[in-house]
Image: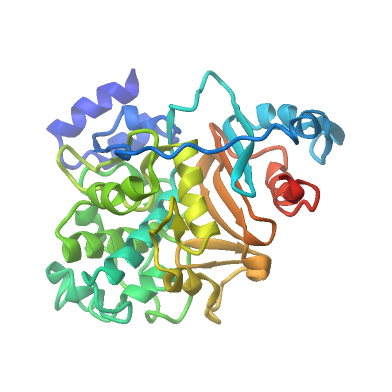
Amino acid sequence: MKKLLCLLFMNLFTGCTYYNMLVLQSPNADDMKIFFNRSISQGSHPFHFKYSDKYLPYLDTVKLYNPYTKQESTLDTLLSQDKTTAFIIYINNQIVCEKYFRGRTESNVSCVFSVSKSVLSALAGVAISNGYIQSIDQRITDYIPQLEGNPNFNQITIKQLLQMSSGLDWKKNKVFDDDGKFYYTPGIRRLIVRHKLSKVPGSSWEYKNIDSELLGWVIENATGSTLSDLVHKYLWEPMGAEFDASWSLDTKNGVEKASSSLNASARDLLKFGCIYLNNGKFNNRQIVPQSWIANIFDIPLSPNQQSSLKHNFLWWLPNDGVDREIVADGYLGQRITINPRYNIVIVKLSDANSNTNLDKVLLYIANSEALSNAK
């Protein structure tokens, strides 16, 4: 009820970011219910996966060690303890496990939070391949004239946004931090222009939402289309999305919150993951350029990157990208794990951040020789 009341206030007050943060507090996976949204229609010819139950007996009975409880548990128990809402394992062109929890079904959509960034990266690649953007080495002010002449933005390139190295300041883990402000503000671009450079652009990696918000602004201006319309035209339609999706906006008729607020079903997120599993191809179509996906693995030597978990072109790379494994990761446990070596994609949606070490379990499954032999 508090969230619905705040939604009404967002129409009345342009400066209610702090009020929203106080009342709404922590984000939830169903936050599309309290924000304005722009719809993304399903594909006109939905693609339906093949299924195999060959490995369900194994997955339903295998005992996995939980270091938090110091006990072995079944996969279903771990998923339930982790407040999982959807879980799909796809191997060798078929789904071998699909489970839903907490009252969800295959048609339910969830806010996928920062998984949105990986979708945004795909849109950037599509924009370049279709000639809307000439080069990732261009300055962002070539496409955002509103920032031209601003010394805090006029040296930043599109590539630096994709590599989270804009150099713009970003306050985290504080009361009224920038993560919360950007999530709840009714004027996201008014917030963007208030930020200043704290480092030389391109000199250092730092995970922050402002880089993705700027990238969304670039793509929107370059294409003359909303991010939602681009997702439908270049991703959802060609891949044969089964369900409608949406992208939450900062205000009524506003702009998409590019860094955090795509709302989609688990099956359609699986289709998106399969695009990257297959070097940009899915449903007999080249949807994202193969050369664009290759950029993910060209990891820059940048300070502040974690030793074994790298981040590039808005994807995470476990083990420095060994086996070309990549992960799209979002708040509260939203995750797409892709491992081409084993021809596997795992999608997990959740209502809470992991407290069961399930991330390591998913990586174990994704690297399983046994499961990869499913026929």
Residue 328 in percent (x, y) is at 52, 53
Residue 345 in sight in this render: yes
The residue nearer to you, when weighing 41 against 349, is 41
At 24% across and 72% down in the image, what residue appears? 133
Question: Taking 54 as reference, is 262 left or right?
Answer: left
Residue 265, quarter of picture = top left
The residue nearer to you, when weighing 130 against 373, is 373
Question: Taking 109 as reference, is 248 left or right?
Answer: left
Residue 332 in percent (x, y) is at 53, 39
At 41% across and 34% down in the image, what residue appears? 25
Residue 177 in sight in this render: no
Vertical position of residue 62 compared to residue 134: above or below: above
Residue 149 in percent (x, y) is at 14, 78
Q: Which image quarter holds the N terminus?
A: top left
At 43% across and 27% down in the image, what residue appears? 107
Vertical position of residue 301 compared to residue 367: above or below: below
Question: Taking 196 as reference, is 372 left or right?
Answer: right
Question: Taking 236 as reference, is 82 left or right?
Answer: right
Residue 23 in percent (x, y) is at 35, 29
